[in-house]
Amino acid sequence: MKINRRATPWGRRRRPAGASVAASYDETTADKEMPVIVMLLIAIVPVLLWAAVNAPHVSQTFASLLAAAALLEVVAPDGIRFGRRIVGTAFCISAAGFMLYGAPVAVLIGCVRGIVRALKIPAARLCTAQAIAWSILAPLFASLLAVMVTKHSAAWAGAIVFVIASFGLELFAAAAGFARTGSVSSSDAWRGFFPWPPVQYGAYGVIGYALAGELSAGHLGVLLFLAVPFGLARASLGSAGWGTEKYVALLERENDTLLNRIGQFDRANGDLIEALAIAIDEQDNAERGRTNRIAQISSRIGSALGITGWNLEVLRRAALLHDVGVLALGGGERGAAHCELGARFVARWRDGRVITKVIEQHHERLDGSGYPRGLKGEQIVLEARIVAVAEAFVELTSGPTAQSTLDALAEIGARRGLEFDPQVVDTLAQAVEPRTADVLPMTRRVR
């Protein structure tokens, strides 16, 4: 049985509105599942034939048990609420059937329960076959164990064994489902079976034992008094649970809409940063693609140093904006002013703290010889140290006096540990190797 913490009754997995089971169930999957379905049928058909032959053929009590099991399975089925397993009240009918007539009736009641579940909630053929097969085989195994105990002890001991074995088999089925699908983590899965389901199994076992005594005395009306209150109670609780799930589903949809809007704003923000990078190159009279190239090399260095996910994107955007302060200065003037002005531009951005520090510190040097504040060593954030090395490499390999990659690496390496972070310098060689050919080429400005 597959456990879904936000499942509807019986652990059903939610599907998008308007989606059918067939939409996610193709013919190839059906062909692969057919041998398993055939094996399940081969396993349960002999069991059903045996149960039908050995069950009482003319018994009003037996027919009433089957009807009560079907009714309770419709109005008060097994369910899962907030990760907790809720045992369906029809289990007490299974327990009563076993105590009155033995394993054959317990098997047939289980078959009725499985068929009602399959009809009420359509699913893929393999899931349906597994649900029906397990609803037949589980009471069979539990009954056989209980019968073995009953031969050497009182009848009530067999009832206890039947309840305990049913719970154990439920755990076994769930474990097999988790191992096959990996739908939830082990901790979440087992949390759904403790501590209340064992208590529920025990309570329904006691009710089933009492019910068997009443039925053996010919009091069939007790089934009506049992089914109606249970059905009303569980239906009320179920309605409350379904209302909660609908509310949670609504919140999830609103959250998805909000995230989509945030994503749109972020993309717009990214496009604006890209445009500013182009404007920086134009204002600075630099070769086109210079700032973008610094950003790409910075991203490669950061990735090699273990920066991932959103932090890596922040580094890329910081590298694109590292010279944004020149837009406020004429003639592409550089110095402490462009660092401070650029940092002031971005300081008001929400979540822009790292970008602000990169803009302000990318001309700082490890030995304190940089500007605007003369920071040293670890006082300079890693992202700023990365952009400093990437910018130095691009400056050395562009323009009329452009050096070769090896010469530029050698010159930067000579300043390793003095001006530039040694770890970043060592990583630079990997970032500009020939295999990184997708780094933007430098395009000479045509005037």
Image: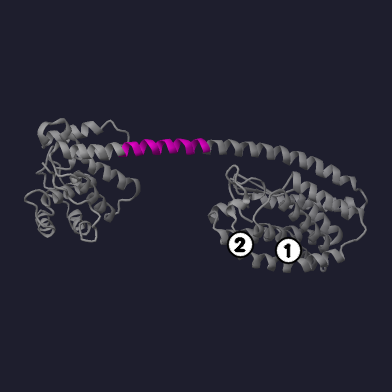
Q: Which residue is mark 2?
A: 176
Q: Say if the magenta span includes residue 257.
A: yes
Question: In the image, is residue 26 above or below residue 20?
Answer: below
Residue 75 image-quadrant placement: top right
Percent x, y for residue 265?
Answer: 37, 35
> Number of numbered discs present?
2
Residue 342 can be seen, yes or no: yes
What's the magenta region? 253-270
Disc 1 versus disc 2: distance between alpha carbons?
15 Å
Q: Residue at x 84, y 52 (%)?
A: 65
Question: In the image, is residue 339 above or below residue 129?
Answer: above
Asked whether 172 or 34 is in front, the reply is: 34
Q: Which residue is mark 1?
A: 137
Q: Residue at x 23, y 53 (%)?
A: 439
Residue 283 vs residue 165: left or right? Answer: left
Q: Helix or strand or loop: what does disc 2 sit on?
A: helix
Residue 58 vs residue 439: left or right? Answer: right
Residue 150 vs residue 347: left or right? Answer: right
Dot 2 amino acid type: Ala
Q: Residue at x 35, y 39 (%)?
A: 267
Asked whether 104 or 402 is in front, the reply is: 402
Figure quadrant of the C terminus: top left
Residue 438 is tagged as none
Dot 1 amino acid type: Leu
Residue 350 image-quadrant placement: top left
Mark positioned earlier in the residue sequence (1 or 2): 1
Q: Say if the magenta span includes residue 430.
A: no
Figure quadrant of the N terminus: bottom right
Asked whether 60 or 368 is in front, the reply is: 60
Name the magenta segment's main secondary structure: helix
Residue 444 vs residue 301: left or right? Answer: left
Percent x, y for residue 102?
Answer: 83, 62
